[in-house]
Image (spheres, coloured by chain):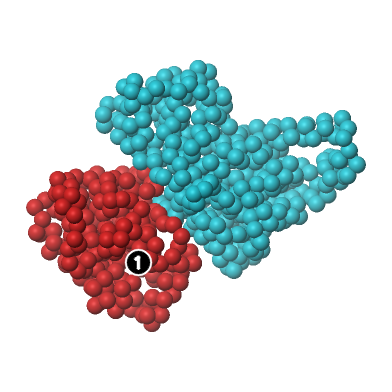
Amino acid sequence: MEANSVIGTINKKGQKIVDPEYLFFEAPRQQHFMTGSEVVREAIRRASVDISVAYPITPQSEAAAMVGDLYVEGYVGDYFRGESEFAVMSQCAGASFGGARVFTTTSGPGTLRAYENFPMWAGSRLPILINVMVRGINSPLNIQPDTLELGMILDTGMLIWHAETAQELLDYLLKGYIVAEEPDVHLPIAIVIDGFFVSHTKDMVMIPSADIALPPYNPYRSPVPCMDMEVPPVRMMRDPFVMKSNYISYATHASWQQEIRAAIERSRKHTIRLIGGLIEEENSDAEILIVSSGTAVAQGREAIRLLAEEGIRVGIVKVKTLRPFPHEEIRQATKNAKLIFVPEFNVVGWMAREIKAVIPDNHRVIDGPHVAGGMTMPPEVIVEEIKKVLAGKKEVVHG
Amino acid sequence: MRKRVNIRMSGLGGQGVVTSAHVLATAASKEGKHAISNPFFGAEKRMAPAESYVRIAGERIYDRGELVYPDVIMVFHPQVITLGKCYTMPFYSGIKAGGILMINSDEPLPLSNDDLGFLDKMNVPIFYVPATTLAVEIAGTELATNMSMLGALMGATKIVAMEAMEAALQDRFGKKYVASGGTATLDEAIKKKFAKKEQLLAKNMDTIRRGFDLGVAWAETIKTPMLV
């Protein structure tokens, strides 16, 4: 810790500011049975958040409302409702430019309405944490989970971590701030959960005491000056410089976008340490693997149990971070697999595309099963897909 | 003894199917079992179809989302069947062999011979529970329909003990609970009906106990009761 450390001091709510490592790995935890929305409240209670802006859209409305309660209780510095999702994300940007630690939530159509802001956040190196609770976005109207919106935010320049359970949601929300605010990263981060399947599901969670909290954000660790975009090293906004069509403005723009991608890669070392690797493996020496993220993995775990009862051995590779994407880890984990199934809660199969792009012999990848529009994915559907391919009844579509 | 019990609750908005699922899962969790509950609904409005799911097991449960293959189906309102106010058609879709179908109705519904034949073939008995009648009689409000349904389930299957249920209700109604707009409004309405929270809890427990007795009596009439 640097000089003038706040560790050990007491905040206005009487919480002791502790070293993040202590909060994450050493502090005693108690068992609670609660919904994902309640878990968001408990994470933010311990996250020393300065500002949260909210706009209601199912399924994130409950969590957003609970953060409002935290404001009333004094755990969050400021809280208000924006005029729309676009306004919310712009207001979050303003708060972050001003040096605040910012939290917000979004879902489905709200995410798309807010979209323009995400690459702007990344380009401006704003370490905003946004909890994306995915839901259907296309017509016909649907409020159930569908990860189509994730495929769309993959290349905004944000860090993206996809939690499978309420426990991961809690841990990722807190750890996400620490990684996003590292000076060599300093990017926005999306902590993603599947709406309803995590947000509205009651599950067991281990939570540290409410009387400790993360150190507040220190804006002076930012690699770019706060609220001053016209001086070096960035000089992003000066009109003649940015707007004039000349080689140097193109070069600056291109190199800056590369710098954002490089910052995503630099987040690896911090992320691996805090969340224990970018992937998680179970029986990954099996010839048949399921590779996916979020609750598609949870359903995959049930499927491998069912298959094990029939003597079919299947392993799982869970992708915890979508950005950075664990290229090398996936290459290694899948090197002996003959068939790689990628179950997804969307119709387009963006996860299968990502995996095919990074592994050799990618004809091994079976793009599916897919469910969309909020349909659940019963483990039996995954089992059926695997057995169909094994029996040669289903043509493997090479991508 | 089943390794895992999957329960699908099918009702109408405002009847408390989401609350019942959360309370039941909390009770199971208080007994040291593994449980997961989650809801499925459309627009939050009264009388719109609403479903919720509870999964209970002795080992870690990963499965979540809409419950396609239930062991127990609880129908909280006859209109789920008679008017097809149901996300899952027919209402018994996916029921596992040897499961139970519980329906809130004072008398048997005019189910088709096809439906009855299917249920018979699957060895799924129907348990008609006069849940709303009991709720009005004991708690003085139809909003306690979910409590008589839970009690009847507990009596018929012994899925959770009364003490665990009492502790779960204390969790849900005994302290401040933040819920979405619709649920919060209903909570307020019901709290006004019972001046005090304690009274609300006591009435809920009374309703559950009466449902429980009905469940026990019903299970005795069944050849192979599904005890869990």
Find disc 1 in the rendering and name its residue: B15
Across and down, in percent, residue A192 comes to 54, 45
Q: Is residue A230 visible?
A: yes
Q: Write down the quadrant of residue A376 in the picture.
A: top left
Across and down, in percent, residue B140 comes to 29, 79
**For the point 61% across and 41% down, which residue is it?**
A153
Across and down, in percent, residue A14 comes to 60, 64
Front-lying residue, B101 or B165: B101
**For the point 44% across and 55% down, which residue is it?**
A200
Neighbor class of circle 1 (other Cα within 10 Å; few <14, some 14-19, many 20+) is: many
Q: Who's red, chain-wise?
A: B
- Image vertical order of residue A120 relative to residue B204, above or below: above
In the picture as drawn, the residue positioned furthest to the right comes out as A240
- Image vertical order of residue B187 relative to residue B8, above or below: below
In the picture as drawn, the residue positioned furthest to the bottom comes out as B195
Colour assignment, chain A: cyan
Front-lying residue, A124 or B140: B140
**Chain letter for mark 1:** B
Across and down, in percent, residue A133 comes to 53, 49
Under mark 1, the amino acid is: Gln
Q: Is residue A23 visible?
A: no
